[in-house]
């Protein structure tokens, strides 16, 4: 029994979203190569606004405690951007990023990956973020899966930019067409709802480069809610936030945070486990709450 | 002068009259709306336009680089302080449409939006 079936049977997880990607990926038959990682997103450390989250300083520590309490620890944890809430003050930005970094050192999992959001990086082209967390785009391999972290936020106009697109192209040229590829971004690469700035200016160019590859999935943040979409054969899955939820795309006149419900604290917040299954290639998702009911 | 040659000679005159005289084809007059962008508002932020009437939106930024993006009409511009930015388009549908700043400009950027109201 794999973890997905175990979680289903025990009812430990939230909604499980699972869909298999294209078949025929390499020689990944061994279940030893299956693993899971945890995605946390949009923690906005430094945010203040009691009406939408009166426990702004306590939500991230609770999420870290929840991950640490998992019976099986993930292979790695990834934060998909907006680690901190934006500030015009460069010193305050560094202070928030430093506090965030110190907090997440409490995670039991030693392998933690970071990405910036526009709140972390857009006002200084990623300078403070890079001082504390390193490059804003990178790639790594884990148990047969090639992970690509794309930066679509350091540019204030939400462009990936030609230089990074060239890097992506060169990286993809080294992959076989059926390699398993997971793309991590902050903003959606497709125009989910440009009226609320839920898009990447040149995201289409990245998707064109990814399209020839048969086993690609994208995990992202930014929109503070779960959302699942396909462009061609590429799946896109956005994660919940750990500070406040936002309304469904276009469902309200304005993109304003959903107010805190004292009767259901932490509603709409959470994190997810992502299982990486090899045969067939699939990424079942288990959504988990910050605080168990 | 043959009737044919006379027609040829008079053709440019007739064309000029058609373009400038009382026989001119009716062209909707272009309207200019001036909008100031500053942290984190557009002034005015609600603009009423007429469907089918060309409009020029002229933006000025007062403090930092801002954006203007009206995705429903596929028009956008960067607004650089000291350099008025102009977008020209003809609203082709009725209703209320959101426009927004699409250049991250600080805490409050997410609330920097406006409304285009297109009426008949």
Image (cartoon, rainbow, N blue to C red):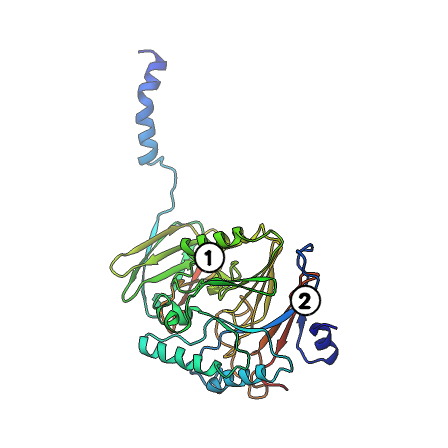
Estimate the spatial distance between the alpha carbons at disc 1 and disc 2, rounded to whole Å: 32 Å
Marks 2 and 1: in contact by CB < 8 Å? no
Residue at (61%, 65%) from the top-left corner?
Answer: A143
Residue placed furthest toward the left: B82
Q: Are marks 1 and 2 on the same chain?
A: no
Give the number of callouts. 2
The residue at 68%/68% (across/down) is A32
Element carrying mark 1 = helix
**Residue B84, image x, y percentages:** 28, 56
Chain on which label 1 sits? B
In the displayed structure, A156 sits above or below A37; it is: above
Report x, y in % for residue B35: 32, 61
Residue A103 pos. (x, y %)? 46, 83
- Name the chain letter of the residue that bears numbered label 2: A
Name the mark on residue B26.
none
Q: Could you say where residue B1 lies in the image, as x and y percent from the top left?
A: 30, 11
Report the side of A272 relative to A223 (left or right).
Answer: right
Q: Nearer the viewer, residue B23 or A256?
A: A256
Are there few (<14), some (14-19), or many (20+) residues within 10 Å of tag 1?
Answer: some
Q: Is residue A219 visible?
A: yes
Depth-wise, is mark 1 or mark 2 nearer the camera?
2
Quarter occupied by the N terminus of chain A: bottom right
What residue did someone put label 1 on?
A: B71
**Observer able to see residue B21:** no
Q: Say which quadrant the C terminus of chain A sits in.
A: bottom right
Q: Secondary structure at mark 2?
A: loop
Front-lying residue, A216 or A113: A113
Q: Which residue is mark 2?
A: A18
Q: Residues within 10 Å of mark 2 (few under 14, many from 20)?
A: some
From the viewer's side, name the closer residue of A248 and B2. Answer: A248
In the picture, measured across the screen, residue B79 lies left or right of residue B51, that is left
């Amino acid at each position: 029994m794999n973890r997905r079936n175990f979680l289903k049977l025990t009812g430990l997880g939230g909604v499980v979203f699972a869909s298999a990607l294209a078949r025929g990926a390499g020689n990944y038959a061994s279940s030893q190569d299956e693993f899971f990682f945890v995605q946390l997103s949009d923690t906005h450390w430094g945010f203040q606004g009691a009406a939408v989250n009166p426990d702004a300083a306590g939500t991230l520590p609770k999420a870290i405690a929840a991950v640490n309490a998992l019976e099986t620890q993930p292979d790695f944890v990834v934060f998909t951007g907006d680690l901190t809430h934006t500030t015009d003050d460069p010193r305050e930005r560094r202070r928030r990023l430093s506090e965030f970094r110190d907090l997440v050192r409490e995670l039991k999992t030693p392998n933690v990956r970071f990405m910036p959001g526009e709140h972390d990086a857009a006002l200084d082209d990623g300078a403070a973020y890079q001082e504390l967390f390193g490059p804003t785009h990178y790639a790594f391999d884990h148990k047969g899966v090639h992970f690509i972290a794309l930066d679509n936020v350091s540019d204030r106009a939400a462009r990936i930019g030609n230089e990074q697109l060239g890097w992506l192209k060169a990286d993809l040229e080294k992959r076989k067409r059926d390699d398993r590829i997971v793309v991590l971004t902050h903003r959606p690469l497709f125009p989910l709802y440009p009226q609320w700035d839920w898009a990447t200016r040149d995201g289409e160019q990245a998707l064109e480069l990814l399209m020839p590859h048969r086993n690609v999935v994208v995990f992202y943040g930014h929109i503070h809610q779960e959302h699942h979409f396909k462009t061609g054969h590429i799946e896109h899955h956005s994660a919940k936030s750990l500070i406040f939820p936002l309304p469904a795309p276009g469902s309200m006149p304005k993109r304003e945070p959903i107010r805190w419900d004292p009767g259901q604290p932490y509603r709409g917040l959470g994190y997810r486990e992502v299982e990486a299954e090899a045969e067939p290639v699939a990424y079942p998702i288990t959504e988990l709450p910050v605080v168990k009911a | 002068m043959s009737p044919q040659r006379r027609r040829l000679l008079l053709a440019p005159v007739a064309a000029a009259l058609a373009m400038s005289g009382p026989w001119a084809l009716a062209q909707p007059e272009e309207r200019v709306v001036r909008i100031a962008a500053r942290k984190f508002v557009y002034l005015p932020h609600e603009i009423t336009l007429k469907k089918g009437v060309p409009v020029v939106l002229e933006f000025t930024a007062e403090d930092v680089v801002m954006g203007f993006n009206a995705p429903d009409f596929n028009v956008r511009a960067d607004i650089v302080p000291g350099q008025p930015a102009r977008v020209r388009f003809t609203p082709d549908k009725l209703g209320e449409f959101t426009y927004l700043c699409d250049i991250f400009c600080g805490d409050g950027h997410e609330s920097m939006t406006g409304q285009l109201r297109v009426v008949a």
